[in-house]
Amino acid sequence: LKHPSNHTWGAMMTATTANANLASRCVHSSSSRHPHARGLMMKNTTNPKERQLENYLAQRGQFSLLGYRSSPLPNNVITRAQSEADTSTSSFSSASLSGEGEGGGGTTKSSKITKLTSPVSKDQFVNFFRMALPYITMHKSATFVIHIPGNVMKDKKSNVFKSVMQDIIILRELGVKLVLVLGSDSQISDLTILKGEKPKFAMSKFGATRRITDEFSLEAAMEACGRNNIAVQAQLTRGPDVRLTRKHGDHYSDTGGFGASSNNEYDNNRNSTNKNNRENLNNGRNFPVATSGNYVYARRRGVVDGIDYGLTGEVVKIDKTSILEALEQGDVVLLSSLGFNAAGEVFNCVSRDIAVAAATELNADKLIVLPEDSYLPRDEANGGKVKSFFTLSDAKEWMKNFAKGTEYEDLVENDRAYAWLRSGYAKSTSPDIINGSTISKNPLTSSGENVKVNSWMRAQEMDYEWRVPSCPIEMCAATFACHCGVKRVHMVDPNKSGSLLVELFTSDGEGTMVARDRYEGTRKATIYDCVGIHDMLQPLADAGIVVYRTEEDLRRSVMSEEVSFFVTERDGKIIACASLTEYENGKCYEIGSFAVAREYRREGRGDALLSYLEEHASEKGCERLFLLTTRTAEWFISRGFEFDGAAEDEKLTLPKGKEVVKGRGSLLFSKYMTTSED
């Protein structure tokens, strides 16, 4: 039986409900004549109709009633404190993948995709859904902008395109509001050549390659964008296997559409309320509707540095209102590389510009970038492993390093177009006060220039260039989007089947995330921070929440090799602090002196600091985090810590060397860290 090429764990969810009697005919096979036929295989059957049905379903890439397929989940993932607070304590033990090790071992052709070689066990299936529940809840009704590059869109029949689209359908069905930006660069070049013309490009002074769009190229662009839209609409229209869904009711129609009602009059009357709710939500439609239109306003790029770019356009703004209206009625919004102006002209724009502009203007919860060449940043100091996380400031430093030693180094360091890359938060003793809340000052460069950017239009007005010479284009887009206000940007390899779902619904993820808010301003404390730490902890010590510590005690702790103090700073003021104390040669760490300034509570500062501590401890090889508390038990329980008992109980297994203050009545909580197997 040929292994289906376009399956996801969403389909696996329905497939595992297959009839038990029929499923009992399936046996596990570790080998087959077909290289991808490993998994649940059907026994030799004497029924030719069953065999014919199996072959037919396999060719269509669907799941049969005689066995289930499961999609690959990563075997090699890097421990990462995901941007969202992880409230789950369970881990998912992933099945093995075929092909190369972590990161794919190199560039993978778009026609191939990593596949699963062994089925997921029932326990793994259950644990995964339990672990994913917090993320499913948080992503519901969130707005995601996803950029799909031209090489993925180029071959509409490829496994990569189908896999990406099935993951996107799952996101939509889980309540995510989706804006898809469809790249078409490679198709435009191919179609231009077919029309007997040669594609033309020019390089700007910033080292960025731009297409020179003539009439032939624009015609090719319009044709390519139309094909892409139709291909995506076709994938979104596909419905599930009705024979499976009927086992759980008639929510799906006989045509495979979504949201159709039952033909049974009794059921229609009995479920009239639910039926009306579904029709109100989907406006009576039977499947997800993909809408496209003139959402992108552009202007002619014109003549730059003596080069006439013809009908190449630059994004001016996004029709935010119309897109939000479409998202609210349940549509999936499709944006192409075409932009329009008030004179009725059409321009060919850069799809990544449109993706960054859309994510910024829509105030999207996430921008997701699928690299064309499977590029993900790697940490050479850590064996070349994929870097799973960047703060915004770290990402900027990473980008600037690409220009060092090149002809563009002086440009990046001094040109105003890259002022945003050199920006930092200026210290101020007089922060703005609005409605009683402290508001931070605008980001400034070292020269005092205001580089605050909160919209794409503002960035264009300031003539910023987001492409840094020699730096991978995906990293540039991710970092600039964060600088412009997008909180989190994810880079995910589309050639790994299911990588988008793993990145969004597991704590370790599968790609690289750049976060604007996560850890921003958090650093290791110095001896000069002791006064600020003491002032923050003193009121909590007076209330009996933390143990009282003198300034001298804090200085010794900050200078100690066993204790690491961390602070979160804003406008030169310490707004949060915590410590990590090492025990058992780094196998165990204690969290202590955890505090957030009163005026900054309920803003996620505590979650950010806790995730920072977990990430730091995990990198050190920590297996167990523990803490003692008297007043904040509920907060830590909701973040995955488990109650181990009274700290003064001699039966508890506290790390060797840990002393408990008698009479405080402290409670012990622990969290066991999960690490990925290489």
Image: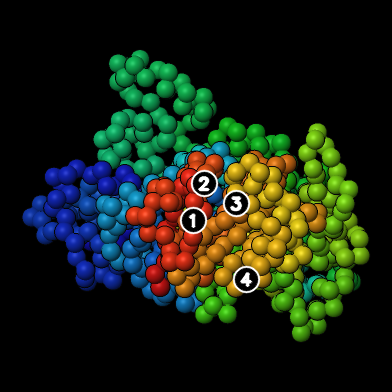
In the picture as drawn, the residue positioned furthest to the front comes out as 663
User: Three-letter amino acid code at disc 4?
Assistant: Ser
In the picture as drawn, the residue positioned furthest to the bottom comes out as 405
Q: Which percent across, then down, holds residue 15?
A: 29, 47
Q: Which residue is mark 4?
A: 560
Q: Quadrant of residue 249?
A: top left
Q: How is the image coloured?
A: rainbow
**Residue at x 22% of width, y 47% of height:** 65
Q: Are marks 2 and 3 in contact (CB under 8 Å)?
A: yes
Q: Find numbered disc 2 in the image and state the secondary structure of the residue it sits on.
A: loop
Q: Which residue is mark 1?
A: 660
Q: Are marks 3 and 1 in contact (CB under 8 Å)?
A: no
Q: Which percent across, then down, holds residue 666?
A: 49, 47
Q: Find numbered disc 4 in the image and state the secondary structure of the residue it sits on.
A: loop
**Residue at x 82% of width, y 37% of height:** 434
Q: N-terminal of the two: label 3 or label 4?
A: 3
Give above or below for 327 relative to 459. above
- Mark 3 to mark 4 CA distance (whole Å): 18 Å
Q: Which residue is mark 3?
A: 547
- Mark 1 to mark 4 CA distance (whole Å): 20 Å
Q: In this rendered view, identify the residue nearer to me: 518 or 453.
A: 518
User: Three-letter amino acid code at disc 3?
Assistant: Val
Q: Are marks 1 and 2 in contact (CB under 8 Å)?
A: yes
- Mark 1 to mark 2 CA distance (whole Å): 9 Å
Q: N-terminal of the two: label 2 or label 3?
A: 3
Say whether residue 275 is visible: yes
Q: N-terminal of the two: label 3 or label 1?
A: 3
Q: Which residue is mark 2?
A: 664
Q: In this rendered view, identify the residue nearer to me: 136 or 598.
A: 598
Q: Find numbered disc 3 in the image and state the secondary structure of the residue it sits on.
A: loop
**Residue at x 34% of width, y 55% of height:** 651
